[in-house]
Amino acid sequence: MAGWRHLIVSLAALVPVACTTPDVGQNVPSEAAGTSNFDLTAPAVYKTPHGLRLIGRACRRHGSSALSPQGVRLEQVSRTGEVLHIASVYLPNLSRQFDQPCSSYYAQIGWTLEEGESIRACFDDRKACAVTPPTASISKP
């Protein structure tokens, strides 16, 4: 029985280490371009051992009956405005129900960011994101 107690104590000692190593949030400029029917938040950017984790949210505007966007396009943008990398991520359907108008998007991407680079997000319609976000956008410093 003493062997089991030692094993449990040893495993319990490992749990705080695994749970207290969160991703490191980066102060990365990011922006998002929504549409007249849907709002899109700028992604939160976290540095991970494997690149970047990007998390954002999309919401249906009140009164919109448009079909839900299928995905979000993420662009890594250089300090000169050149698009360096592109990724498309799945966006769960945005319900037309009043109590569930929003959905979250998530991406784990093997990108590294250099000084002055930023992340841009827009709904994926197989075109580049708008350089100057329209009024339906939310930016994050």
Image (cartoon, rainbow, N blue to C red):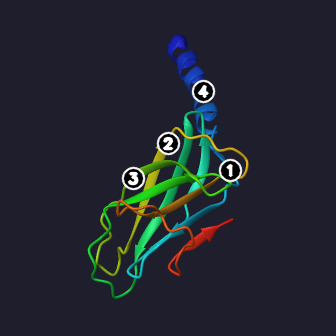
The residue singled out by tag 3 in the image is 89
Q: Secondary structure at mark 2?
A: strand
Q: Secondary structure at mark 3?
A: strand
- Which quarter of the picture shows residue 37? bottom left
The reply to whether dot 2 and dot 3 touch (C-beta < 8 Å) is no
Question: Looking at the picture, which amino acid does disc 4 mark?
Answer: Leu
The reply to whether dot 1 and dot 2 touch (C-beta < 8 Å) is no
The residue singled out by tag 2 in the image is 109
Whether residue 2 sits left or right of residue 37 in the image: it is right
Identify which residue, 88 or 20, lies in the foreground. Answer: 88
Which mark is nearer the camera, 3 or 1? 3
**Gap between marks 2 and 4, in whole Å?**
28 Å
**Gap between marks 3 and 1, in whole Å?**
21 Å
Which mark is nearer the camera, 4 or 1? 1
Give the mark nearer the N terminus: 2 vs 3.
Answer: 3
The residue singled out by tag 4 in the image is 14
- Which quarter of the picture shows residue 6? top right
Question: Looking at the picture, which amino acid does disc 1 mark?
Answer: Gln
**Image quarter (top left, top right, bottom left or bottom right) of the C terminus:** bottom right
Sort mark 1 into few (<14), some (14-19) or many (20+) by Cα contacts within 10 Å.
few
